[in-house]
Image: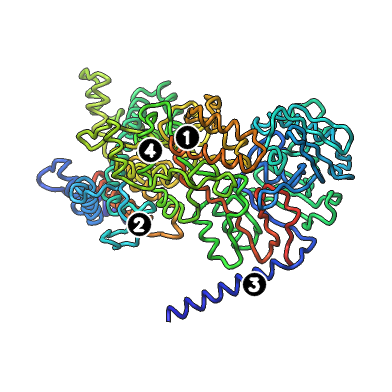
Amino acid sequence: MGLTKQWVSAFGAVLLALSAVSVQAETPKHGGTLVVSIGTTPRHLNPAVQSGIATGEPGAQLFATLVRFDDKWNARPYLAKSWQTSADGLVVTFNLVEGATFHDGTPITSKDVAFSIKTIQTNHPFKSMFRAVSSVETPNPNTVVFKLSKPHPALMLALSSQLGSIIPEHIYGDGQDPKKHPRNSKDVVGSGPFKLVEFVRDQHIIMERNENFFIKGRPYLDKLVMRIIKDPSARSLGRENGEIHLSAFESTPQDILHSKNVPHLTATDQGYAAIGPITWLAFNTKKKPTSDKRVRQAIAYAVDRDFLVNAVMMGTSRPAYTGIHPDSIFHEPNVARYDLDIDKANAMLDEAGYARDADGMRFPLTIDFGWPSAKPMAEYMKPQLKKIGIDVTVRTSAGFPAWAKTVSTWDFDMTVDVVFNWGDPVIGVHRTYLCDNAKKGVIWSNTQQYCNPKVDAILTKAGQENDQQKRIALYSSAQKIIADDVPIYFTDTVPYHTIFNHTKVGNPPATIWGTCSPLDEVYLKN
Amino acid sequence: MTDYSIQERSLQPTSARVEHPLIETARMFAGNRAALSGLAMLFIIVVVSLAGPWFYPTDPFEMVWSPFSPPGAKGFLLGTDYLGRDLLAQIIHGGRATLAVGCAAALLSVFIGITFGALSGFYRGWIEETLMRITEFFQVLPTLLFSMVLVALFGASLGMITFAIGIVSWTGVARITRAEFLKIRELEYVTAARSSGASNTNLIFRVILPNSLPPIIVQAALLIGFAILFEAGLSFLGLSDANVMSWGAIMGNNRPYILLHGFTIMYPGLAIFLTVLSISLIGDGLNDALNPKLRNR
């Protein structure tokens, strides 16, 4: 009986999957309002001077970029219809789409591009994005020439999604501080597929179709509503009862698993390759005893990555073995993985001279965490490291700012952390390992204070190598050295999922930037 | 009707021998079945919490089996929590911290409350004005919010949590103490003590305070229950000491999974419920036993 029932439901699931596939193949329709939920209120909507996904999701709808990426890491034309790179890689010429205008009707010219890059260079926190750009020349309104001081393989990624937003000079070039410009959150003028109607803090961001979008016939949607809902359970409920069509960056395992039981919902972890979020256990490599590589390696052997993925994250995340996301072309899977081996860990600590005392403990360590979803992993370390004689004290921070202060001022032994790759290793990965990026007071710099001149040399070289295959080889060797040094023990990917109503949403965002790319191809069924 | 019967009874001679007040209280208490069962329940809870860890030594933090194992699986009577830790061990070991926080916080608030109430009730004048304004300030504070801010600011350690609970719950004791002092300081025996040369300290500690204790004791008993509930509330919101197991912490840890695996929250909830219930019953019994108006019925 039970078996038959199971077969019937399995058959039903297959039917459902088939019907979903056949529906996907239908031609996109115009019209309708898509309701998307976002979890935090962005500081403002101008991604040229503000990093982070909160600004990125609406920002990519309001502001267009020179290029966009598909789901296979290929740069595609967007505001630039074509481009040429010189043989030495130091001059990149972009030809802009003709007749493109900003939301207020002003034509987009090469001057706006030059102004945007200048603004980003001086105001955006990701300094490595355009550090190699020595000048942006504008020979005519439709041609932009980037002059580079050294080859810059990350240039195309830095010019896509929310990183390289083209902003109008006639609005933001009025001399005001671009970071505090009033037009960052009101009457925003960009050139993306949607125009801002209203942004109410903690409530919603309402956008409507840009009738004069430079890609004819797009976007398909009439209106795009982003509802700001902080509580994950409220979002989950909203998706279930049909109020919310799509939510991105959902990372609560229970909610992801729950959505898989709701017939009209689909949960996918596609669309986060470029963001590249990784959860890890960071060590203070300048403080005893974690300054000892053997101690760090022993801890790595004692942590059970499979348990973290399958039990703590309930199978929603994927194991991560290096600081480059598994969906990146630069990811090297064949590194030292430190698969669970308690005996080996104990032997290593014995050998390193950390004997057990009368209570069976070798030394105490603290572990910090900065947000609620990191607590299970911190709590897990306590009993787990007790097995190798480390007495772990879990330190609960008074919220994110307090945690950021503790970690960035190097006042920690171990901490749970989540860091994003941001597309290219030059932008989001180098910062964690370069010796000169151990900047006290700056969170998500090299807070481990790790310094290996060999790694420095390889990363610097890889950051200027235009040949993709050579770059892959360089990053591969860097990942192997870092895995051996373990300044960080990488545990798993952040289980970001996009959960959407597949009976309503057509062409859900699936590029490497996911919902932080223009949603001009998304349409509403019926 | 009722007035008449009371009057009639009070006119009758009571017992031949005058009982010691403590014995009288005990007799009154022993006659209260609800209070007695509360006392028995609390006794069991305290014994299990204090002695249990010796009989059931499993480390409450140790991951013993797969997460969310149902009750009974692999010999774990209550199952396991979200990290695969033995829930029975957590309940048994967690009782100590829970009761300790409850008693310590109640003690702290009784101490602050008696100090404020006694000083303002005895000296009156500007001292009373000042202390009562401070009491009112703490009275109108949103208690949960204020404690949350304290714990969030100074870190979620057991000591800080105890302090945060104690510091918001003393106003009731202060008001009761002050009222008792105001009443008793005008009585003849206080005047007598004063006229025979008793110092203020003497009057406060040896004359008035012992006589105002009954309502304070009742309030203190109820405060223990209140503090236990408060600790559970803070833990439920994630503000618990991650290095100490308490019943509230078990609830807080497993709260995100309440819809998927509700049993993990049920046990600590039940333990807290029974403890607070027994304390309330005892408090009620004490109230009845110590209340002179209800005596000699």
Q: Are labels 4 and 1 assigned to the same chain?
A: yes
Packing grade of label 3 (10 A; few <14, some 14-19, many >=20) is: few
Residue A304 in percent (x, y) is at 38, 48
Callout 4 touching callout 1 (CB < 8 Å): no
Q: CA distance from mark 2 to mark 4?
A: 26 Å
Which residue, given by chain and number where applicable, does mark 4 sit on? A297
Q: Residue at x 73, y 35 (%)?
A: A89
Q: At numbered mark 3, what does the secondary structure look like: helix, strand or loop?
A: helix
Image vertical order of residue B234 relative to residue B138, above or below: below
* Circle nearer the N terminus (4, 1): 4
Specify whether A511 is left or right of A113. left
- Of circles 3 and 4, the one toward us is 4
Which residue, given by chain and number where applicable, does mark 1 sit on? A398
Which residue, given by chain and number where applicable, does mark 2 sit on? B66
Amino acid, disc 3: Ser
Q: Which color mode does the image show?
A: rainbow
Specify whether A207 is left or right of B163. right
Q: Are labels 2 and 4 assigned to the same chain?
A: no
Residue A284 in percent (x, y) is at 43, 30
Which residue, given by chain and number where applicable, does mark 3 sit on? A19
Packing grade of label 4 (10 A; few <14, some 14-19, many >=20) is: many
What is the number of the mark on residue A27?
Answer: none
